[in-house]
Image: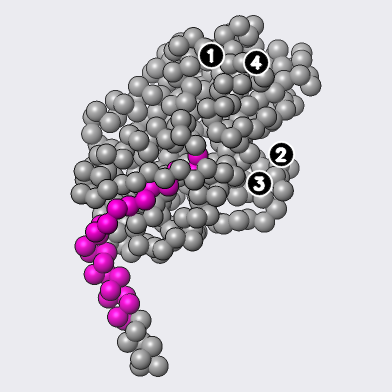
Amino acid sequence: MKKLLACLALAACSTLVAAQGYPTKPIRLIVGYPPGGGIDFTARSIQQPLQDALKQQVIVEYKPGAGGMLAAGELARAAPDGYTLLLANTGPFAIAPYLQAKLPYDPVKQFTYIGQISQGSYIAVTRPDHPAKDLKEFVAWAKGNTGKVNFASGGNGTSTHLNGELMNQAAGLDMTHVPYKGSAPAVQDLIGGQTQILIDAGTVLLPQVKGGKLKALAVTGPKRDPQLPDVPTVRELGLANMESIGFQGVVGPAGLPKEVVDKLATELARVLANPELKAKFAAAGAEVHSQGPSEFSAFVKGDNEKWAKLIKERKLQLD
C-alpha cells in the first residue's frame, strides 16, 4: 500500500513539474471539419499569435467526420497533458451527441473548457434570384411550395442542421434536410440551385453575400450584423423563436492540470485582446468573445440544454 501511495505521489509530482514547464513541445490543435469553413478561419487566425504567445509550435490538424464528433471523440481519448487540444464549436459540443441513440460522449463532463474565442449570429441565405427579399417572405414562399423546399447543412448534427430544424419548428415548415460534408460544398450546391436555403456562420457566408453570389434574408442573433446593416434579425421579422448564436473555443481532454489550463487560458485571452485580431473577426462576420474556463463551461452547458430540448421535441435521431 505504501508503495502504491508513493507511486501515486511521484506521478502527481511529475505531472505538476511537467505542467509548470508547459509547453515544452509542439501542440496539436484539432479541427473537426475540412478546410474552408468557419472553424478553419478561426484556427488559422489564432494559430500564429498563439504560437508566439506560447513560444511553441501549434500544429493545426484536420480530422473531419460525423459532424465534428470524430475529432471530439479523439480528444476525449487523448492524454490530459495539454499537447492535444481541439477547436470546439456548437455542433459536436452542444448538438450532435444528443442526436445519437446512445450518447457517444458527454460534452459537458468529458472535456476541459479552456477559453471561448467567439460568438456570432448565423445568416440565413438563398440565391440572389429567389423572389423572397427577407426570411419572412421566404417562409411564405416555402408554405406555398410544400414538399419542394430543401435546406442545406454542413452535415448531420451540425449547427447548420439544427438551425434548419429550428426554422422548421419556429415557422411551421417541413423543409427537407440535405446534409453535406462541410460548409463549402453546401454553399456551392445552394449557389447551384440544388437547395433553397442555408443558415450558417458569417465567416462562411459573408464573402458570398458581399460578392453577390448569395442573398442574406436574416441574421439569427439579437442584433443586426454590422457587416450587413440592412439585413433584419429574425426577431424583427416575427421569428424570435429562431434566435441562435454559435460559439467557438479551445477545449482539452478531461483532467488537464490547472497549471496548463491557466497558462492556455491566459495566453489565449491575451491573443484575443489584440485589436487587429478583433477587426479580422469582425470583417468576417464574427465577434471575438473571450471567456475564461468557468464562464465558457457555463455557456456551453446552457447551449446543451437548449439544443437537447429542440432535438427531443423534434424527435430527431441519426442512428
The residue identified by callout 1 is 214
Earlier along the polypeptide chain: callout 4 or callout 3?
3
The magenta segment: 9-33
Q: Residue at x 50, y 51 (%)?
A: 72
Task: Identify residue for label 4.
Answer: 193
Seen in the picture, residue 134 relative to 15 is either above or below; the reply is: above
Q: Position of residue 192 (x, y in %)?
A: 62, 16
User: For the point 22% across and 64% down, which residue is it?
Assistant: 20
Considering every residue shown, the one lying at the far bottom of the view is: 1
Who comes first in sequence, dot 2 or dot 3?
3
- Density class for disc 1 (Cα within 10 Å; few <14, some 14-19, many ≥20) is many
How many angstroms separate mark 1 from mark 3 (CA)? 30 Å
Per the image, the residue denoted by label 3 is 99
Looking at the rendered structure, the kind of residue marked 1 is: Leu
CA gap, disc 4 and disc 3: 28 Å
The answer to whether one can see residue 275 in this image is yes
- Pointers 1 and 3 in contact (CB under 8 A)? no
Q: Closest to the observer: 241 or 176?
A: 176
Instruction: Label 4, secondary structure: give it.
Output: loop
In the rendered image, residue 214, in percent from the top left (x then y), is placed at 53, 14
